[in-house]
Amino acid sequence: MRVVRVRYAEQTFYAALYPEHVRPLGERIEAPRSIPLQEVALERPVQPTKVVCVGLNYHAHAQELGKEIPAEPLLFLKPPSSVIASGETILLPPQSENVHYEGELAMVMGKTCRNAEIEEVPEHIFGYSCANDVTARDLQQKDVQYTRAKGFDTFCPIGPCIETDLSPEQGLGLKTLQNGELRQRGSTSDMVFPPARLVSFISGIMTLNPGDVILTGTPPGVGRITSGDSLSIEIEGIGELQNSVQDQG
Ligand code: ZN
């Protein structure tokens, strides 16, 4: 099932997504059982307590940044305030001259998870989505910590939906397009540390709550975005995350 969070008639609720309509999930929602897609606004599909990110999780991306593959997953956090929906605008902050897109597979937690073994991970996952780990590359190189470079408002587009029936270990194609031109192409099977391993590793450090998001790293081909760009991150079996880019002003 593809799950979206939508705004309709001054209510926000979760719904199942179909090609032309949505069906509200949950019984207490006062809305028709089927609503045409053009009558709802997509909201960000998750409200995480944290977004845990993994750096350098594809060999070729580490190579293009001139960095070694880490022996263990390299973790950093993006604040919940950076999350936006598909269709919203990425705002370029005045502090950076060089902001990059990073197309990534996002995992969304379904159950509280602490110290999970790899084989216990699947039962804790709600589903998968597309994400953009927007990064101020100049600030990332300048600062030792990634917090500033990765943490600006709007720097974490996620969506359009959460697909609940999917297995990324089999290899899902991931593509990033900038103004319609192909910039990144990868497969989730090329990850250095596969998704279940990541969740097990992270849950040994911090409790993962329902709705928390894990970004699994980006394939090669990262590049600069500028005001007026349109970005699309497409993952096989999930859909297309679309965002425009503007100066913060
Ligand atoms: Zn990233």
Image: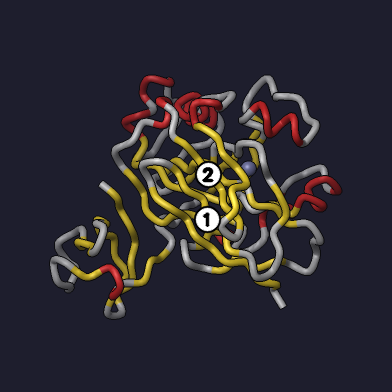
Residue type at tag 2: Lys
Does residue 109 appear anywhere in the picture? no
Counting from the top left corner in percent of width and height, residue 161 is at 37, 53
Q: Are marks 1 and 2 in contact (CB under 8 Å)?
A: yes
Q: Which mark is residue 232?
A: 1
Relative vertical location of residue 135 with respect to residue 108 in this rendering, above or below: below
Quadrant of residue 155 in the image?
bottom right
Identify which residue is drawn at 79% across, 61% down.
96
Does residue 122 appear anywhere in the picture? yes
Counting from the top left corner in percent of width and height, residue 216 is at 54, 37
Quadrant of residue 5 in the image?
bottom left
**Residue pointed to by mark 2:** 175
Label 1, label 2: how far apart the Cα atoms are: 8 Å
Counting from the top left corner in percent of width and height, residue 211 is at 41, 49
Question: Which colour style is shown?
Answer: secondary structure
- Quadrant where the C terminus sits is bottom right
Residue type at tag 1: Ser
